[in-house]
Image: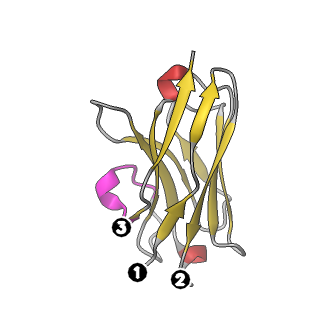
Amino acid sequence: QVQLVESVGGLVQAGGSLRLSCAASGRTFSSTVMGWFRQAPGNEQEFVAVISWRGGTTYYSDSVKGRFTISRDNAKSTLYLQMNSLKPEDTAVYYCAAKRPGQTNFNQQPSSYHNWGQGTQVTVSS
């Protein structure tokens, strides 16, 4: 079973940038669709971005499109989320997630993901 370990998030001012990483164990990372989700207090878990096995296909939520970039390094079994032009409404706990190895769909429902990281807090001050 893939284990996902996220980097520490942080506190950043509005307009700033932050990069999250997610290190995966196991040997199936390169055949696993990966995603990022977030959850703010009192809100449901929200889809942020998803990336295909080799990184050639990505999708973003409308709320982050143009500001966030999802990427991956299969040689390092690591997933990234580059967050630019951060806004206070981006404040949330961010989670990386993995679908089952071999799956190729980009279903954005959290229930379609098989493994989850522990979550990391990102706080954007105004």
Picture coordinates of residue 114, whole percent (x, y): 35, 67
Q: Quadrant of the N terminus?
A: bottom left
Q: Residues within 10 Å of mark 1 (few under 14, many from 20)?
A: few
Q: Residue at the spot x=63%, y=72% of the render? A: 77
Q: Residue at the spot x=59%, y=68% of the render? A: 53
Left or right of 35 in this view: 66: right
Left or right of 109 in this view: 95: right
Q: Residue at the spot x=33%, y=52% of the render? A: 110
In this view of the protein, which residue sits in the foreground, 125 or 96? 125
Tell me how far mark 2 sits from mark 1, CA to CA. Answer: 7 Å
Precedes in sequence: disc 1 or disc 3: 1
Residue with the mark numbered 1: 1
The boundaries of the magenta stretch are: 106-115
Precedes in sequence: disc 2 or disc 3: 2
Residue with the mark numbered 3: 114
CB under 8 Å between discs 2 and 1: yes
Does residue 42 sit above or below 54 in this rendering?
Answer: above
Q: Residue at the spot x=29%, y=37% of the render? A: 44
What amino acid type is highlighted by mark number 2?
A: Gly
Badge 1 element: loop
Picture coordinates of residue 89, whole percent (x, y): 48, 23
What amino acid type is highlighted by mark number 1?
A: Gln
Which residue is farthest bottom? Answer: 27
What amino acid type is highlighted by mark number 3?
A: His
Does residue 73 sit above or below 58 in this rendering?
Answer: below
Residue with the mark numbered 2: 26
